[in-house]
Image (tube, helix red, strand yellow):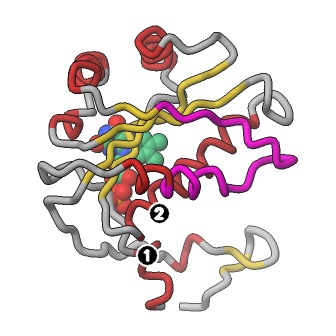
Amino acid sequence: MEKLSYILDRRSIRIFKDQKIDSETIKKLLTAAMYAPSAVDRQPWHFVVIDQPQLMEKIMKIHPHARMLQTASHAIVVCGDEQLQHDDGYWVVDCGAATQNLLLATHTLGLGACWVGLHPREERKSSFSRLLVLPSHVKPFALVALGYPDESKSRPERFHAEKVRYNGWESPFFST
Ligand SMILES: Cc1cc2nc3c(=O)[nH]c(=O)nc-3n(C[C@H](O)[C@H](O)[C@H](O)COP(=O)(O)O)c2cc1C
């Protein structure tokens, strides 16, 4: 199980130290994001890296659950490209995989991160599209707040045997 600790011990971090992440590290995180699986390997994503305090302030005004940007070093907005996606709607799934890779890479490198949802809330997506001047075929999917963690969280219990079925819905996979 310990080899899985980078997955099991990842938690949403919302309080960060007053320390900037360097560009080389940002590149490593984005590399991990871009190695995510995507339908027909279309890689229909773009990333907007943000560290300008005025922009962070504006984001906190338009998103009600992004207060962690107050202390974050950077934010990365994961965007999906409707022109690059395999078929209608696939960009959402592909961006989900890229966002999770970004979160796991952040934790693996000793940093902290929090996924801040944009998709599927249309009003949030439109506000971000305007703020970041995105072309119309590029859709904001999620914002990831990043920094050096200034809080620690323990691993909750999330394995639930009853959620697993065997060869169809009728039988449980794990007998209790
Ligand atoms: C689609 C999605 C949207 C989320 N939006 C927010 C958000 O707007 N603000 C926030 O603080 N956390 C947000 N989170 C983080 C969740 O609250 C967090 O993942 C969940 O409580 C489980 O905690 P953990 O990440 O520490 O395991 C979001 C997570 C997902 C997957």
Q: Residue at x 26, y 17 (%)?
A: 58
* Relative vertical location of residue 87 with respect to residue 149 in this rendering, above or below: above
Quadrant of residue 50 within the rendered picture: top left
Circle count:
2
What is the three-letter code of the residue carrying label 1?
Tyr
Disc 2 residue type (three-letter)? Leu
Residue nearer the viewer, 112 or 92 = 112
Q: From the viewer's perspective, is 84 left or right of 76?
A: right
Q: Against 136, is 13 above or below?
A: below
Q: Position of residue 124 (x, y in %)?
A: 43, 19
In the rendered view, would you say 81 is above or below 95? Answer: above
Question: From which residue to which does the magenta span run?
Answer: 28-48
At x 24%, y 74%, the residue is: 154
Q: Is residue 10 above or below residue 146?
A: below
Q: Which type of secondary structure does the marked residue at label 1 adopt? A: helix
Identify the residue at image location x=45%, y=16%: 132
List the residue tagged with mark 2.
104
Do tag 1 and tag 2 residues touch (Cβ < 8 Å)?
yes
Is 38 a magenta residue?
Answer: yes
**Residue 49 sits inside the magenta stretch:** no
Where's residue 80, x and y in %? 64, 31
Q: Secondary structure at mark 2?
A: helix
Q: Earlier in the sequence, mark 1 or mark 2?
A: 1
Q: Estimate how packed mark 2 is, as few (under 14), some (14 to 19) or many (20 or more) residues with alpha carbons within 10 Å.
A: many
Disc on res. 160:
none
Which residue is rendered at x = 75% and y = 31% of the image? 89
Structural distance between the alpha carbons of marks 1 and 2: 7 Å
Give 169 or 150, whichever is nearer the viewer. Answer: 150
Question: Could you say where residue 29 lies in the image, as x and y percent from the top left?
Answer: 48, 55
Q: Which residue is mark 1?
A: 6
Q: Is residue 132 left or right of residue 13?
A: right
Neighbourhood count class around disc 1 (C-alpha, 10 Å): few under 14, some 14–19, many 20 upward? some
